[in-house]
Each structure stands twice: as C-alpha cells, then as structure tokens.
C-alpha cells in the first residue's frame, strides 16, 4: 500500500504541532510558577537538549528507517522479535493520553465560547474560581465539550496525512505563533509587568531539588511528545532526503520558544494584577479569565488566547490519534474511516470517565487520585518514561550502529551529522538510559 508523505515544511509544522500543545500553554507556565521560575527553566532547557533531543532523534530514526507504524517498526527493525510488544505499548499510551487530553481540550472549547460571549467582565476574583469549579464539576457541559473536541480531532485525522494533518498544521501553526507572540508583546507593556518578567528570568537555585528536576524532566518528555510513538509515526511519513538532525532540533527549539513566549504572555499579566503565579492547573482557566476581565482590551485578548489554546491542543491531539490509526490501517487492514470511528469511541468512553471524575465520579479513587489525575500521573510519570527508556535501549543496544549512522547521515552524505554522530551515539547508548532510570527510580521512591 502506498503511504502518504509530508512535504518538508509540512513535516516541520506537523512535528512542531505535536510538540506545542497544552503542555506549553497550560502546563509549562504553572510548573514554572510552582518550581521557582527561571531556575526551573534553566534545568528544563538543559534536560531538553542533552537528554530529550537524543531521544527525539532515536524515535525519528526508528520511524523514518522503517517507514511503518510503531508496531511494525519495532517488529521489522528487530527482525520480528519481542520488541514488537514495545511497539504496541507505544500505540496504547497515546490513546490513554488522548482520552484525558481531550477533556482539557474540551475546557478550552468552553472557555473560547465564554470569551466569545464576553463572560469575563467586571466580576471579582472568586467569581472566576467558582465559575471554573462549577463548570468542571457539572456532568453535562464538560462531557459535551470533550465530545466536540474529540470529534474535531477525529475529523482532521480521517481526512488523512497530507490533506488533513499537514494542511491543518500548515495553516494553524503560523497562526498560533502570531497570536501567542502578539499577546506576549501586549503583556509586557502592562504596568507592573516587570515583576512577572523578573520572576521568569531571575533564577533562584535554592528552589531546585530532586522533585523539581523530576518535574522538569516529565514536562520536557510530555512537551516533546516523547515515549508515545507519535514522533516515530510522524517520522515514518518524512522523506528520506530530509535531515533528521535539522528537523529534530527545529522541533525542540520551536517547542521551547512557544513555552517561553507563553510564559511571557501569562506571567507579567498575572503579576500586573497582583495575583499568585502558583495557582496550579487552574492558572489558565481561573486566574487568566479574571486578568482578561481587568485589562484594557481584555475581551479581545481572551478570545485570541483561547483560540490559541484550542489550536495548540488540536495539533497535538491529532498526532496522538494518528499513531493508532496508522497501526489499524496497516496491520489490521481497516479503512482509515473505520479506524478513526473505533478509536473515537474508545477514547470518548475513557475520556468521559475522566471528565466525570471532577463531578459525579469524584468519589472513585485509584491510589488516592481521581480518575483524571490517575491517568495523567500514570502516563506522564510512568508510561511515558518507560516508552522513552525502551526507545533508547532499542536504538542504542538492539539496532546496528551502522544502520543508525546510515539513517542519521542520509547514507553518509550529511557531513555535520556525521561529525556529531559519535556524541549522539554516546548519549543514546549510555547517558539517556542511566539518567532516565535514575530519575524514574527516584520518582518511585
Ligand atoms: N506535546 C504535547 C503538549 O505539550 O501538549 C502533548 C503530547 C502530544 C503528548 C502528543 C504526547 C503526544 F504523543
């Protein structure tokens, strides 16, 4: 069967689209808030480039070398061994993540709707917390929003690689960039913004300890979509002529840039209105709407912000869905449409449980967490780390060094890649597994 191919720019924006998501706009700013501002950012940058970039490249190599879905990639590159079960693992994990990601994607649908109907004006701070709590704990509206979000994701993926995912990313990623940048520029001109910038850019290393390093690593994995089979699957649609080092670095840099610009868009505004930057996951949905209600021109900024949040979430959610779609189409010979419909139903059901876990199902706990937190914690702290560990072990210890070299340097024709290969190989084979295991074990303890 002939597979679709991304164009060069298409591949770049699709990968960047997968990486840039709620992780950048929703998670990164509140983690920075909770973990000591700039010091956390420095640790995050180090981990992103020393540890995560080699993992990203490993996934890229597996995908592009095999030109297959994640299951077949592990199976065929290892000559049909048990590694294929790792492939299956990297297909199931993004489905779990997609299920609860879609719940938050749904919240951004609701908040976009609220901003379009100008619901953020003039009320007191507590009104917004109550608005948020009432919304997430009610049964129907969040469920409806989750459905809408998942439906949009599924429709884009049904259309296909070139006409769906690539076209959508090509239009939406530049738009996203312009919106987030515009909000950031506006935010730094607010009176009192400098306290927010100080907070972001003045490092306080006393805040850095084992748990903030683990948080930075978890965030870096999540933000770069590592350990999920996503990058592998997208890479399998990338042309053999493209430069893996360039594409991977460009994705990591744009991901970091988006996270930083999002920080600059959010923190100065939070400080300008004397609010607490450490308000956790609610930062975007309860602190920011209040800020929007206070600032001049805030209703327009609110609309732009929630459009950005929705777009960022969609370009990521489509990448999660594609992993399993590619598997069902290629291995189970399903039509793309049927694969999408079946996966929609599964993710909708799991997501519905997560959505209801803020309200009617809030009494159900696994390991002391509600269902949403359980899935979020399981996938971002355990499954994703395992996926990344398996990936580097596979590339570093199972595949042939000569094959990795061949793929990474396009048959020896890219001289810069050839020069850097030694360092990359060392990082993939030794540094990445050791550090991942160390952080994973310390996290478990
Ligand atoms: N990188 C995305 C974000 O930062 O929101 C999340 C994500 C996308 C995770 C795709 C995993 C994935 F496979």
Image (cartoon, helix red, strand yellow):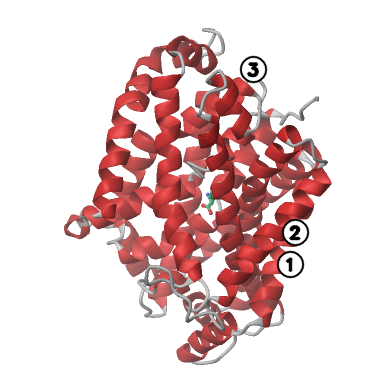
Tell me the quarter of the image containing the N terminus: top right
**Which one is earlier in the sequence, the residue at label 3 or at label 2?**
2
* Mark 2 crowdedness (10 Å alpha carbons): few <14, some 14-19, many ≥20: few
Task: Identify the residue shown where x is 48% and y is 29%.
Answer: 57
Give above or below for 355 relative to 118: above
Front disc: 3 or 1: 1
Secondary-structure class at tag 2? helix
Looking at the image, do the residues carrying marks 3 and 2 touch, with CB atoms under 8 Å apart? no
Horizontal side of residue 158 vs 404, given as left or right: right
Secondary-structure class at tag 3? loop
Task: Identify the residue shown where x is 40% and y is 75%.
Answer: 272
- Which of 435/81 is in front? 81
Task: Point out the residue furthest to the top here.
Answer: 412
* Mark 1 crowdedness (10 Å alpha carbons): few <14, some 14-19, many ≥20: some
Q: Is residue 10 visible?
A: yes
Q: Is residue 114 visible?
A: no
- Where residue 430 sits, quadrant-wise, is top left
Looking at the image, do the residues carrying marks 1 and 2 touch, with CB atoms under 8 Å apart? yes
Horizontal side of residue 242 vs 144, given as left or right: left
Q: Position of residue 241 (x, y in %)?
A: 64, 17
| Residue with the mark numbered 2 | 152
| Residue with the mark numbered 1 | 148
| Residue with the mark numbered 3 | 241
Task: Point out the residue furthest to the left here.
Answer: 206
Give how far apart the Cα atoms at labels 1 and 2 are: 6 Å
- Which of 212/441 is in front? 441
Disc number placed over residue 347 in the picture, else none: none
């Amino acid at each position: 069967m002939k597979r679709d191919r991304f164009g060069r720019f298409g591949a770049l924006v699709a990968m960047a689209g997968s990486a840039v998501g709620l992780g950048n706009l929703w998670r990164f700013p509140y983690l920075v808030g909770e973990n000591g501002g700039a010091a956390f950012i420095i640790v995050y940058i180090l981990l992103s480039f020393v540890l995560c970039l080699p993992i990203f490249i490993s996934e890229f190599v597996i995908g592009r070398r095999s030109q297959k879905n994640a299951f077949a990639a592990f199976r065929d590159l290892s000559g049909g061994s048990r590694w294929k079960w790792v492939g299956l693992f990297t297909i199931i994990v993004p489905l779990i993540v997609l299920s609860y990601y879609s719940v938050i994607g749904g919240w951004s649908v609701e908040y976009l709707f609220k901003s379009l109907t100008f619901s953020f004006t003039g009320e007191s701070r507590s009104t917004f917390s109550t608005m948020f709590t009432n919304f997430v704990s009610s049964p129907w509206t969040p469920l409806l929003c989750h459905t809408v979000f998942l439906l949009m994701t599924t429709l884009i993926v049904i259309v296909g690689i070139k006409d769906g995912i690539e076209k959508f990313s090509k239009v939406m990623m530049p738009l996203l960039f312009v919106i987030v940048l515009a909000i950031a520029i506006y935010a730094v001109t607010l009176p009192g913004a400098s306290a927010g910038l100080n907070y972001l850019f003045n490092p306080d290393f006393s805040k850095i300890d084992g748990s903030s390093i683990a948080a930075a690593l978890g965030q870096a994995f999540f933000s770069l979509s590592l350990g999920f089979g996503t990058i592998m699957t997208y890479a399998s649609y990338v042309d053999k002529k493209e430069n893996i080092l360039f594409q991977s670095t460009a994705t990591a840099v744009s991901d970091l840039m988006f996270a930083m610009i999002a920080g600059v868009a959010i923190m100065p505004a939070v400080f300008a209105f004397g609010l607490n930057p450490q308000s956790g996951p609610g930062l975007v949905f309860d602190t920011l709407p209040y800020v929007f209600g206070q600032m001049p021109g805030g209703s327009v900024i609110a609309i732009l912000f929630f459009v950005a949040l929705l777009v960022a979430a969609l370009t990521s959610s489509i990448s999660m869905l594609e992993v399993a779609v590619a598997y069902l189409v290629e291995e189970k010979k399903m039509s793309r449409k049927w694969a999408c419909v079946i996966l929609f139903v599964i993710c909708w059901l799991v997501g519905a449980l997560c959505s209801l876990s803020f309200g009617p199902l809030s009494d159900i706990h696994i390991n002391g967490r509600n269902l949403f937190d359980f899935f979020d914690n399981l996938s971002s702290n355990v499954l994703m780390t395992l996926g990344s560990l398996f990936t580097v072990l596979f590339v570093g210890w199972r595949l042939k060094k000569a094959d990795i070299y061949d793929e990474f340097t396009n048959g020896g024709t890219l001289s810069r890649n050839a020069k850097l290969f030694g360092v990359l190989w060392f990082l993939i084979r030794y540094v990445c597994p050791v550090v991942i295991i160390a952080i994973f074990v310390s996290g478990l303890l």
